[in-house]
Image (cartoon, helix red, strand yellow):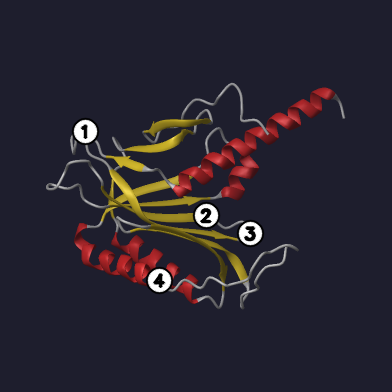
Amino acid sequence: MSQTSLSSATYRGRYLRRVLHIGRALVTGPIALFPPREIDSFGWLEPVLRIEADPLGVKSVRSISIFTDHTMNRDEDLLQPVIRRTEWNRALDKKNRPNWPMVDISLGYCEDALAQVEEVVLGLQDSAQRLPFVAFGLSTHRSRPEPPGDLLGFLELHLVNGAQSLTFLAQWRTDSDLAARLSLAFAQLEAAMQPIRRTGWRERYNTELSSERVGILWDWDGSVPEPPTTVMNA
């Protein structure tokens, strides 16, 4: 293989890793949401719940999150909770290699179904107290527990209650009670969404996704940034 071909293949590989890295970050979601200025000029919301479903094969990766008002020194006139939903056909982006991952993001209020949303959140917080974590000791020979059921993919649950936070990643299996509860909660939160336009909303990340600069707070307005002249290192 010529040096030119090798350099081209290396560049394409790094470019693809960049797209997949950004896609994963958008699915996981921002550390804060800022509403349009006509709604509020200084407040923001932060995530208190997130469910991610990453099935095996070519199916789409999906996530759903709830954001609540975390504005400093605000005790009244709080911003409404916002539900953020994503869906990403990762396999298609691997094939097409766009400049920016094709992650479908939607926002919605849940004012009309707030009681049901509260019930979902309380149910997951209650379940979190009894998460099925297997005592297995050190995995020194790449061994691991083998839960029953067929492997369908992976699920992630992130919860915050104001004083504590928890992130739990588990295999998605056919015989898993947790997987059934998370799938139901996902569907219930989707049903509770009252869609709103994303125009004017900003998402804050702790990495500048458009250039891979780490440690820099970066606000994204939903538009597609210009592709970088260089890509992330291997």
Q: Which mark is residue 233?
A: none
Q: Amino acid at mark 4?
A: Gln
Q: Secondary structure at mark 1?
A: loop
Q: Position of residue 129 (x, y in %)?
A: 40, 71
Of mark 3 and mark 4, the one earlier in the sequence is 3
Q: Amino acid at mark 1?
A: Arg
Query: Nearer the N terminus, badge 4 or badge 2?
Result: 2
* Contact? badges 3 and 2 (CB < 8 Å): no
Residue that numbered label 4 is attached to: 129
Q: Nearer the viewer, mark 3 or mark 4?
A: 4
Q: Which quadrant of the structure image shows residue 93?
A: top right
* Residue at the top extreme, as displayed: 229
Q: Residue furthest left?
A: 76
- Residue 43 x, y percent position in the rendering: 22, 39
* Label 4: which secondary element: loop
Residue 37 numbered tag: 1
Q: Is residue 154 above or below residue 134?
A: above
Residue type, label 3 = Gly
Q: Earlier in the sequence, mark 2 or mark 1?
A: 1
Alpha-carbon neighbours of circle 3 within 10 Å: few (<14), some, or many (≥20)? few
Q: Secondary structure beneath disc 3?
A: loop
According to the picture, the residue beneath numbered tag 2 turns out to be 61
Circle 3 residue: 57
Mark 1: few, some, or many residues within 10 Å (few <14, many ≥20)?
A: few
Q: CA distance from mark 4 to mark 1?
A: 39 Å
Q: CA distance from mark 2 to mark 1?
A: 31 Å
Badge 2 element: strand
Q: CA distance from mark 4 to mark 2?
A: 26 Å
